[in-house]
Image: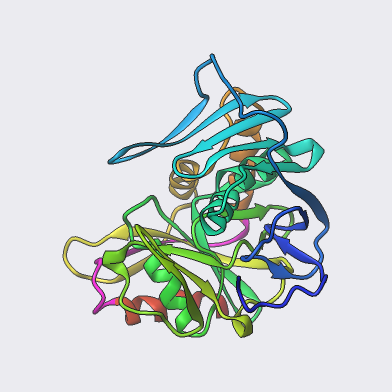
Amino acid sequence: MTDFPRNGDPQSCYGFSLTSEIDLRFTRPGASADAIEIAEMRGSEPVHDEPEILQWLTPNGVAGKLYGGGAIFDFWAEGAGWFRMAPHERTVEVPPGNDAVRREVHLWGVPSMVTFTRLGDLSLHAAAVERDGCAVLVAAPGQHGKTTLSVALHAAGCRLLSEDISRLQVGREPIVLPGPTVVRMRPDTFLGVPEGMQMVEESTRVHLEATRDRVGTADPVPVAAVVLLRLSENGELRMQRCDPTAALRDLWALAFRIPVSDDRARAFQQLADLVSAVPVYDFWRPLTFETLPAAVEQVAGLCAS
């Protein structure tokens, strides 16, 4: 287990104060306004005759399937097993097992995303970093260097709030709720343990976590800007303010919602409110390590703006 002390102190993740039957490693200290209970799966594993409502694909096949709707959802994750979510009962059940890291990493993925989305908040496929009390979201589909850039921002002195999924509450002032302290990197993008992080394990993915002095609290952070990563074909780094209509279209593709639910209409309105409240930037950059310091400087500078 991590050297991060628990001592019965309140722990939170994604804006949830946590009560848990299992040891949790990647949380943050502090109480939050909402709460969920984490428990091992009660009863037999789910069996579904109906088709899944969503699935997640990798080049090697199906990595995850989501079933259900309404009050109860079941999620199957390859290599981890079944999770059951009852968002309005504030419970998430996890599979039994000895691979604690894999299980918790999956817990803070789809099961958490389904839970806070059904409770009315916005989920974006985006990393989030904080500096001087302001957050910048780094949004992109896979294979756009989002994790590499967010880890480099953390190493440069920003605080990593989430690496892959961001929970947002969009009111008069949009805020992001800090997620887990774990990061998953592909081995081909891993050049060593960066400043402010420590190794958890290395397998098909390299798992890192923020060091104790860099975790910070679970308190929400106001959003200063959103950055949409683009792949530069000419090697140029260029950041440009994005038209709100175009920003809304591109962020819509990165927003999670449950099919055949009120999530679609709510998420669209939340995104419209977000692009009206904070600036959104297109950021073209090549996927090279040589240009990473310059990219970090440009993105980190948006916190101050």
| Coordinates of residue 235 in the picture (x, y in percent) | 19, 69
The structure residue drawn at horizontal position 30% and vertical position 65%, both measured from the top left corner, is 187
Viewer can see residue 233: yes
In the rendered structure, does residue 286 fall within the stretch colored magenta?
Answer: yes
70 w.r.t. 161: above or below: above
- Callout count: 0
Color scheme of the displayed model: rainbow
| Coordinates of residue 285 in the picture (x, y in percent) | 28, 67
In the rendered structure, does residue 235 fall within the stretch colored magenta?
Answer: no
State which region is magenta. Answer: 277-291
View extreme (top): residue: 49
Question: Is residue 251 or residue 187 the one in the foreground?
Answer: 187
Please identify the quarter of the rendering in which residue 22 is found: bottom right
The quarter in which the C terminus is drawn is: bottom right
The structure residue drawn at horizontal position 51% and vertical position 44%, both measured from the top left corner, is 80
| Coordinates of residue 166 in the picture (x, y in percent) | 58, 56
Viewer can see residue 285: no
161 w.r.t. 66: above or below: below
From the viewer's perspective, tell me whether residue 286 is left or right of residue 41: left
The quarter in which the N terminus is drawn is: bottom right
Question: Is residue 94 or residue 195 the one in the foreground?
Answer: 94
Question: Is residue 278 or residue 150 the one in the foreground?
Answer: 150
154 w.r.t. 261: above or below: below
View extreme (left): residue: 234
The structure residue drawn at horizontal position 74% and vertical position 69%, both measured from the top left corner, is 219
From the viewer's perspective, tell me whether residue 238 is left or right of residue 277: left
| Coordinates of residue 17 in the picture (x, y in percent) | 79, 58
